[in-house]
Image (spheres, rainbow, N blue to C red):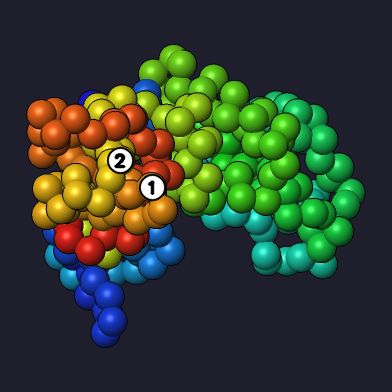
Amino acid sequence: MLALDIQNLNKKYEYFQLKDVSFQLEQGYIMGFIGANGAGKTTTIKSILNLIRKDSGEIRILGKRMNEQEVELKQEIGYAFGGVDFYSRNRIKTLTNVIRPFYKNWDEATYSNYLRRFNLNENKKITDLSMGMRVKYNLALALSHGAKLLILDEPTSGLDPAARDDLLDILQELVQDGEISILFSTHITSDLEKCADYITFIDKGQIINSDEKEAFIDAYRLVSGNESQLEQIKDRLIAYKTNSFGFTGLIHTADYDPTLQLKTSMPTLEDIMIYFSKKEKAHV
């Protein structure tokens, strides 16, 4: 069964729009959701959660339409948007007491376990927590009510490298039994290279590619050569940068001609994002 199925999602604002956004997340996997600031990640996520009203398209979660069964489905979704910025003068314990009754499947043992794992003191005020600790508390809430789909928007942005690594381990543990699925939006693409099974890339409100991580990366190559070689391949490049030695550019693997004898290498997810942000000619 699909954990998340988005078909032809459209949302138009005065200066931005989502255009026919479609992708699917299989149950039991982690999908990295990447794109530059303003690309449409948060708008897509808010549409999934019905926090903003879409113009058209269909969103199904666990086979059910979000707009028809929102109350029921939100029992099945855990979501974390970075830190906690509400009721900041209250203690953790007080805020949890407010949130707990909304979830019929709240598991106190699971919640207590994450408090211990994240070294969270229930008697501390939210305002006294570091950004990293606020993120951890938000995650503890999201993971404590039996959610089948976790939607995480920049959950690692305030964490130090050790804490981020621990979180990635937790996410991988969660999907091992095939019951939980995770949509993970982040700018820290190295985190996704460690833990994601699938990658979906959005740029200027449109999905550029959505595929298994290895296949996603394999669809592109970094190429480099001298100035005369650039003239031979320039029209096929997604984007390129020149330097004193010549150029380096990103190309679709299918568009590369090996007879040109350029230096080639596999890009990182970050490379792909950077070159699409700089693209002069896009072939998408």
For the residue carrying disc 2, how many other residues have a C-alpha within 10 Å: few (<14), some (14-19), or many (20+)?
many
The x and y percentages for residue 143 are 58, 36
Q: For numbered disc 1, what is the local secondary structure?
A: loop
Locate residue 187 relative to residue 282 in the image: left or right: right
Tell which of 223 and 32 is nearer to you. 223
Question: Mark 2–mark 1 contact, CB under 8 Å?
Answer: yes
Tell me the number on the disc at residue 161: none
The x and y percentages for residue 85 are 67, 65
Q: Which residue is mark 2?
A: 224
For the residue carrying disc 1, how many other residues have a C-alpha within 10 Å: few (<14), some (14-19), or many (20+)?
few
Which amino acid is tagged 2? Ser
Outermost right residue:
123
Outermost top residue:
177
Q: Residue at x 53, y 45 (%)?
A: 188
User: How far apart are the two marked residues, 2 and 1, measured between alpha carbons?
Assistant: 9 Å
Q: Which residue is mark 1?
A: 245
Q: Residue at x 43, y 44 (%)?
A: 270
